[in-house]
């Protein structure tokens, strides 16, 4: 009997170790959590992409561009403005250069860029507090091209809570403590999203990606 209990204890200890590696031990909330921002910063800093964009632009406003991930991927000789949360901008400033700058507002980014060739946003609109207002602000900048990727839309406006693993945020992989991250998601209707692009022509739509070209004025 003693050997049986000893065996049981060893098995349970092993299972607990496996569980600690697989199941998150903690949940953090919100996109501006310092731990989440630091993970994204460190992963972006170390990221070495092996692809490039087929875009042609001299000025780019990258809404929700984190710490400059898309700037690295694009490999464009362009003046690049990332618009992010205040906490992300504060951390990302270490990576700023003459060509890459970080801003907390679209207007400040636009002032620095001048005429905007490309407005780019990848999987960011739905994580803002007021997607409709952000959408209108970005359209009002009158960029030559509006390029949206991974936009989460629905038949009508819907708010939910999304959960991801901390390690899955940012490019690449790192060895960090397994945690969950939760943040609210606000989906607006596809009809409202398309209608907001007054003065633009939709030239390409593929799944959750959209490309609009400004109509000649």
Image (spheres, rainbow, N blue to C red):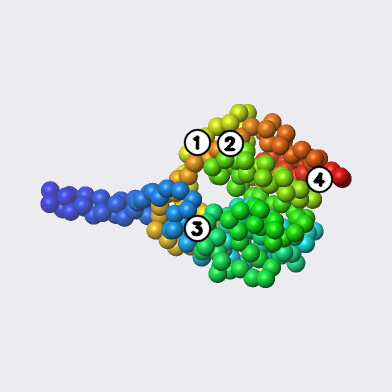
What residue did someone put label 1 on? 160
Considering only order in the chain, which callout, 1 or 3, is on the residue closer to the N terminus?
Answer: 3
Q: Nearer the viewer, residue 4 or 25?
A: 25
What residue did someone put label 3 on? 87
Query: Which is in the foreground here, disc 2 or disc 4?
Result: 4
Q: Residue furthest top?
A: 156
Side (left or right) of 138 relative to 18: right
Q: Are marks 3 and 1 in contact (CB under 8 Å)?
A: no
C-alpha distance separating marks 2 and 1: 8 Å
What residue did someone put label 2 on? 187
Considering only order in the chain, which callout, 1 or 4, is on the residue closer to the N terminus?
Answer: 1
Q: Are marks 2 and 1 in contact (CB under 8 Å)?
A: yes
Q: Secondary structure at mark 3?
A: helix
C-alpha distance separating marks 4 and 1: 32 Å
Q: Residue furthest left?
A: 2
Where residue 98 appears, as percent x and y from the top left, is 67, 71
Q: Residue at x 76, y 50 (%)?
A: 143
Q: As displayed, is residue 50 above or below residue 26?
A: below
Q: Are marks 2 and 4 in contact (CB under 8 Å)?
A: no
In this figure, what is the number of numbered marks? 4
Q: Residue at x 79, y 41 (%)?
A: 200
What residue did someone put label 4 on? 214
Q: Secondary structure at mark 4?
A: strand
Q: Nearer the viewer, residue 46 or 156?
A: 156
Considering only order in the chain, which callout, 1 or 2, is on the residue closer to the N terminus?
Answer: 1
Q: Residue at x 66, y 50 (%)?
A: 121
Query: Which is in the foreground here, disc 3 or disc 1?
Result: 3
Considering only order in the chain, which callout, 2 or 3, is on the residue closer to the N terminus?
Answer: 3
Circle 2 packing at 10 Å, graded few (<14), some (14-19), many (20+), is: many
């Amino acid at each position: 009997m003693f050997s049986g209990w000893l065996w049981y204890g060893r098995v349970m200890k092993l299972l607990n170790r496996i569980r600690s590696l697989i199941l998150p031990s903690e949940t953090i909330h919100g996109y501006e959590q310092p731990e989440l921002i630091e993970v994204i910063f460190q992963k972006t800093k170390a990221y070495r992409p092996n692809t490039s964009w087929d875009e042609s632009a001299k000025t780019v406003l990258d809404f929700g561009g984190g710490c400059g991930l898309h700037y690295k991927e694009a490999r464009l000789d362009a003046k690049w403005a990332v618009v992010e949360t205040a906490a992300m901008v504060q951390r990302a400033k270490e990576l700023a250069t003459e060509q890459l700058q970080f801003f907390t507002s679209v207007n400040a980014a636009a002032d620095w860029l001048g005429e905007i060739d490309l407005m780019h946003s990848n999987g960011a609109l739905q994580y803002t507090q007021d997607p409709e207002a952000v959408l209108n602000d970005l359209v009002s900048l009158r960029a030559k091209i509006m390029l949206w990727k991974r936009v989460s839309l629905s038949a009508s406006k819907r708010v939910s809570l999304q959960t991801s693993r901390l390690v899955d945020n940012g490019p690449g992989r790192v060895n960090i403590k397994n945690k969950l991250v939760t943040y609210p998601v606000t989906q607006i209707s596809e009809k409202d999203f398309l209608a907001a692009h007054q003065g633009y022509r939709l030239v390409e739509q593929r799944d959750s990606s959209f490309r609009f070209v400004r109509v000649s004025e």
